[in-house]
Amino acid sequence: MSDRPETVRIPAWQRALGWAVHAYTTGGLFLAAWITLILLQPDRATDDYRFCFLLLFVGAVIDATDGTLARLVRIAEAVPAIDGRRLGDLVRFLLSAALPLLLIDRAGLLPVGYRWVLLAALVASAYGFSRKGLKTADRQFRGFPSCWNVVAFYLFALPVTGQPAALVILALAVLTFVPSRYPYPTRPGLINRLMLALSIPWAVLVGACVVRHWRYAPGPPGMIGLSAGYPTLYLLVAWGTSFWRWSNAERPGEPGA
């Protein structure tokens, strides 16, 4: 008898589904290219930025769902030659960090002389994406999870411009390096599941704002303000749970430390 391990044969349908999920994730690259072409136009109108946010919204939907699809088809077995997580991270970095920061710049939300703040946010995002301990053992993000697509949307939609916008960006960039914990809604856990449930009506509100024509440049103030409640709650939950963990951590010298 041969001592070679038995090769597991992957059904053709499972391989096909695996490649389909990778193609779904790769669709984010086409969205990124489309957004780049719009932002590099010499002349842009409010509706051009609205359309960019619509494309970013579609990209966020892909990012929120491709992981679940990958687990359903057991993609590591179906397509072992492709690292789906690395592919997802590449697409996510473009759509949630690099291009939203470029949009902030092209939309003129920052005052003259403050563009370095965007570079600081980009460097912080690169650090966040590349660190090994990005996700904790209890399935949460460690440090601000570089959701610059959401930040760009609310800076543009509320609007928040000038030095206040620069301060918001710089503060969140610094929080990337602070070992606080942020919910990861698509993963197991009570807080994660709660934030996932609340993210559904939030996504509906944001989707309604970016799909319809923005008569109020960029959208209906009431809907924008109402939708801002979710990211506000997200940050409060993250900072609140982090503070609770810090305050209840055992200190050196105390019993059990």
Image (tube, rainbow, N blue to C red):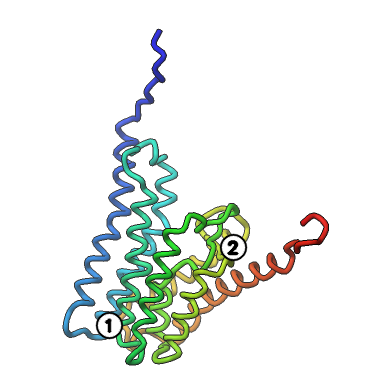
Q: Nearer the viewer, residue 36 or 202?
A: 36
Mark number, residue 142: none
Q: Check disc 1 and give the amino acid type.
A: Arg
Q: In the figure, 92 relative to 152: above or below?
A: above
Q: Quadrant of the N terminus?
A: top left
Q: In the figure, 53 relative to 3: above or below?
A: below
Q: Quadrant of the C terminus?
A: bottom right
Asked whether, in this view, residue 168 is left or right of residue 15, the answer is: right
Asked whether, in this view, residue 186 is left or right of residue 90, the answer is: right
Q: Residue furthest top?
A: 1
Q: Check disc 2 and give the amino acid type.
A: Leu
For mark 2, what is the residue?
A: 194
Residue beneath the point at 28% across and 54% down: 26
Q: Residue furthest right?
A: 255
Mark number, residue 106: 1
The x, y position of residue 18, in whole percent, is: 33, 42
Asked whether, in this view, residue 43 is left or right of residue 201, the answer is: left
Residue beneath the point at 60% across and 74% down: 236
Q: Nearer the viewer, mark 2 or mark 1?
A: 1
Choose the circle earlier in sequence order: 2 or 1: 1
Q: CA distance from mark 2 to mark 1?
A: 35 Å
